[in-house]
Image (cartoon, grey):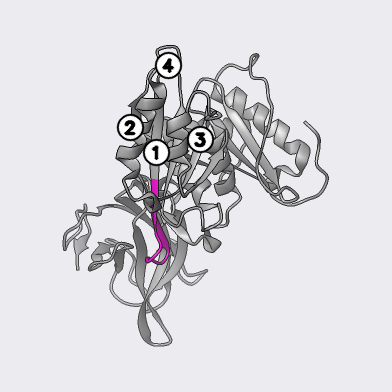
Amino acid sequence: MEKTSGSGRICAGIDYREGRPRVCYQTEQMKEPQELPLNFEKQTGHAACLRKILSALKRYGKKEDIRAAVVLPDMSEESIRQTLKEAYEAGFQEGQLQVMGELESLVHFVMHQTNDIWQQQVWILEFGTDEVKATGIQANKRSIPIVTEAREPEYWYVGNLLEGNRDERLLQQVRERFGKNSNRVSAVFLTGTDLNTRDYKKSREEICSRRRVFLGDLLHARGACMLAGDRTEHRQYLYLSEQTLLYNVQIRSSRDGKEELCTIVRAGLNWYEAGESCEVLLCSEPLLEFSFQSMLGGEPIRAGMHLPDLPERPRGTSRLLVEVYFSAPAQCEIEVTDLGFGELYPSSDLCWKETFILEEQEEVSHGTGYGL
């Protein structure tokens, strides 16, 4: 492991789908991610392994310049929160590390290739002893941003080489999935095989027919690393997963005498990363009005939040802190704190909390708030 001189962001992709992680890293001086060879035999538990990874990455630059993404086999809420907890115990700071599933990591790997690669379907074929794990990815180039979808992996039984007929079985699966029109698939990535002509004469010819084919490894770690180095505002594509936050959270406000909706949280990021705050001045009754607009379109969900017992003050002299975060993909938590208005109107220390369950309906489920 040779130290790279220079400064700038250091990115890492950590494939933690199995017992020991596999890691790729990339500095701003590198054209593409490379494997970070680490031995984890003496480490026990995720926190210890993540601590070793962080220590190795600090050889390439400052700790605050490190960004990492972890690929997990289980994307349940409990698993996500536990992984983030262990990452913080290992020394990662909030905002330095994100979590994703294996499908998302493959999407980021594919979408960071040149656009001729993903003009049509892209398939990733991961070869095992008896099976081939096949994942198809499709980008809708007509949408802005480009919406990308990934199929749930299929497991093609092809038998082992000693049994014979592996080539014929693979050929049949490829023809069934890729279709008669070879233009439907623009690229194929292969891992765990060299697809040599001795063992795969027929299937190799079919796979390589009128499309680009690549041999690779560590695709999940590479995709995670590419995402870690990606700046969201420059990303031209969107992957919709179960963790994607679909709603923009807006608050109704007044500026220069005109009413407008001010966005507090923007859709498109993972729901467990969504968390923003703002300060507002209350100009009328003790009520805040929110709008939840789905990025998939349709009418926005509108809801109000009462602030009972807020002290009566002149117009514009109640300063409020509004904090918004998500506890589930469609469950928004809003906390409002009375900050007062300097020495003239001290804070009452009152705090209001509300949970909004966002559903595809005209009104929003809530506690003490109400639909508008």
Q: Describe the element under mark 4 as helix, strand or loop.
A: loop
Q: Is residue 104 left or right of residue 250?
A: right
Q: CA distance from mark 4 to mark 1?
A: 20 Å
SS class of the residue under badge 1? strand
Q: Which residue is pictured at 51% across the width and 53% down the height?
A: 117
Mark closer to the observer (4, 1)? 4
Kindly report which numbered mark, 3 or 4, lies closer to the viewer in this rendering: 4
> Mark 1 = which residue?
135
Residue lying furthest top in this view?
Answer: 162
SS type, badge 3: strand
Q: Is residue 101 visible?
A: no
Of labels 3 and 1, earlier in sequence is: 1
x, y percentage for residue 54? 67, 34
Please tell me whether residue 361 is drawn above or below residue 105 in the rendered image: below
In depth, the one of 19 and 174 nearer the eye is 174
Mark 4 highlights which residue?
Answer: 160
Query: Mark 2 and mark 4: span between their CA atoms?
Result: 15 Å
Q: Is residue 75 above or below residue 324?
A: above
- Magenta span of residues: 137-148
Q: Quadrant of residue 152?
A: top left
Q: Could you tell me how far apart the alpha carbons at marks 2 and 3 are, in whole angstroms?
A: 17 Å
Q: Which labelled disc corresponds to residue 172?
A: 2
Q: Which mark is residue 190?
A: 3
Residue 286 at x, y percent in the picture: 29, 69
Answer whether residue 142 is magenta in the image: yes
Among numbered discs 4 and 1, the one appearing first in the sequence: 1
- The disc, 2 or 3, on the residue closer to the chain's N-terminal end is 2
